[in-house]
Every structure is written in C-alpha cells, then in structure tokens.
Amino acid sequence: MRIAVVGAGGVGGLVGGLLARAGTQIAFVARGEQLRAMQANGLRVDSATRGSFTVAGIEASEDPARLAPADAVLVAVKGWQVREVAPRLAPLLKPDGIALPLENGVESADDLARALGAERVAGGLCHMLSWIEAPGRIRHVGDQLRVTMGERAGGGSPRLEALAAELRRAQIDAEIAEDVTAATWEKFLFIEPLGSVGAVTRAPVGVVRGLPETRMLLVAAVEEIARLARSRGVKLAPDAVARALEVVDRLPADATASMQRDVQAGRASELHDQTGAVVRLGKESAMPAPVHAFLYAALLPQESAARRAAERRG
C-alpha cells in the first residue's frame, strides 16, 4: 500500500514516520523548515513507547501533484489548512483511493468531500500527544497512539480494513467505528474545551481541572458541545460527557492541547475551526453557545494579531 501524508507536524510526522519504519511506501506533503530538514537529514521520531529512530531518504514535496498517486491520503494539517489544500489533493489519490482527515475539529471530512467527492473520503480522527520538537524532529509522549476511521455512511469497508492493517503493522492502534461521526464529536467534546479553556487561562490541564472555578468552565464547555451535537442529530453515547471528562482527568498534569500551544506561542491557531465552529454551528442549529461565544471573543484579538503577523511574513 502506498500512503501519502499531508502535513508533517506532530500527527503526520509521527504516523508517517512509524509507517515508513515499518516498510510502508510513504510520501509527505510538507513545507517550510520542516520540509527542508526532512529532505536534508530525514525524519527523526522520539517516542518513549514506540522507540526512537530516523527515517532517511524521505519522499516529500510541497506540491501534491509532484508525488505519485496513493491508495490512501492521511490529511494531518490544521483545520483551516484543510480547505486550502483539499482542492490540490485530487492528483494525489488513485481513482479508487481514499482520503482520511486527522484533524481535531468536526468539519474536515465535509471540507475534503466537497473538494474530492464524497465517495473518496472517509471519516477519521486520532488520539496522540506529539509535536515538532525541532525541524525534522517529532516528539511523542505517553502511550496513546490511535487512529479511528469509518465510512461516512456508517461502518467499515475493505479499503478501511486494509488501511487499518497497515497502521497496526506500524505499531499504531487502528479502530474502525460503526459511527465515525459520533466518534469525531466525542473526541471534540474534550479536545476543544481543553484547547479553548487552556488558551484563555494559559494553564496546563492539571491546573485547569484542579481549580473548582476553571473546572466549572471546562465542564460547561463540554456540556455545551454535547447539547449542540445532539441538536444536530449526532448520536452521542448517553455518558459521552462523563467519558470526555474522564479523559481530561487521565491526562498528564502538564499536558496542553495543540491549539493552546499555538495561541501561547503567538502562532495562527485553530480558533476559528474549533471554538469558532461551536459558535457558528450553534447559530446554524438555533442552539446558543454562550460559553464558547465568551471563549471565542476572549481569544479573537490575539488570533487576529497572529494571522496578521503571518501574512506580513508571507
């Protein structure tokens, strides 16, 4: 199986690196310092549970059209970047190939389907804590490393079974969900409040969950997303809120979400695609989201400044 990974950051670099180590034919769509470092020195992965290794001879390009078509395309970029890159991915997919989003939001599969066609896109999500430690170097912490996928109409398929087998061969836990839409929203239940509340408070999860006042804010954000999801017909499990909070409580005390890390570093973040998405989808569904309206408004000035700075840098 040939797999293309779009984005070589914490998720894409880790998943693609493990697949390459296992012998899967891998190509990366990457850019900037990360692309240059990978082309010059390969990709280094450091993981306490999957080992440390370097993959040399990386096949990578900034232009998807310069890479040979793949059986599967794993899209692991930021939420807003999915809309930017999706129209350029058609040449990267074989006629019977499949694209799988691995973003933190709930709209990426729809964005890909609009650009590539619904039949060429599955639903997907991932659970892992990893990031770019330096150009060409990925750090993975903890033992969680899971990719969940499913056909958007429900259940699995031979093409997803083949992809899951390839991931498992690379020491990546892979699951096929009967209802991948519900699974995507159930991840969103904890990752979005973790990022939004963490970004507003500038505190790691141990502090956020340990102070009664900030824990109350976190719980309110989780409950608000659950109400929104159910109003949109998503079949969340009855105990979805409790299980989301259990996930938060099991995280290392110093853990932070990627959106929080981007906000604190002054980088453009997924604010519009996570916090803003709750506000926007709430308006569409006539389901007010006052907690997220507050979080979004509080973070918007810094986000706007970060995006203006990025535009000036070109």
Image: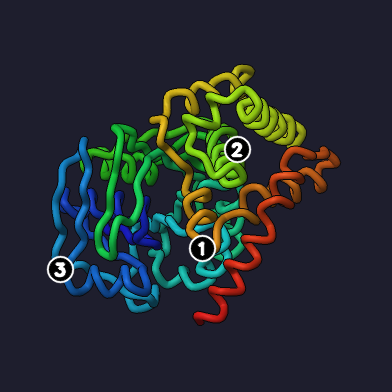
Rounded to the nearest angstrom, the CA distance separating label 3 from label 2 is 39 Å
For residue 188, side relative to residue 134 (left or right) = right
Q: Residue at x 18, y 65 (%)?
A: 42
Instruction: Identify residue for label 2.
Output: 193
Secondary structure under badge 1?
loop
For disc 3, the marked residue is 57
Residue at coordinates 36% horizontally, 37% vertically from top-left? 146
Q: Amino acid at mark 1?
A: Arg
Binning the other alpha carbons within 10 Å of mark 3 as few (below 14), some (14 to 19) or many (20 upward) gives few
**Alpha-carbon span between mark 1 and mark 2:** 19 Å
Q: Which mark is residue 267?
A: 1
Mark 1 or mark 2, whichever is nearer to me: 1
Q: Are marks 3 and 2 in contact (CB under 8 Å)?
A: no
Is 134 left or right of 204, judged from the image as shown?
Answer: left
Q: Is residue 114 above or below residue 189?
A: below
Q: Is residue 144 visible?
A: yes
Label 2: element kind: helix
Q: For the point 59% across and 69% down, which residue is it?
A: 307
Amino acid, disc 3: Gly
**Is the residue marked by circle 2 packed among few (<14), some (14-19), or many (20+) residues within 10 Å?**
many
Query: In terms of sequence position, does the residue under pointer 1 or pointer 3 come before the other?
Result: 3
* Residue 184 in sight from this viewpoint: no
Viewer-proximal residue, 282 or 237? 282
- Specify which label sits upstream in the sequence, 3 or 2: 3
Sort mark 1 into few (<14), some (14-19) or many (20+) by Cα contacts within 10 Å. Answer: some
Label 1 vs 2, first from the N-terminus: 2
Q: Position of residue 135 (x, y in %)?
A: 28, 65
Q: Nearer the viewer, residue 80 or 6?
A: 80
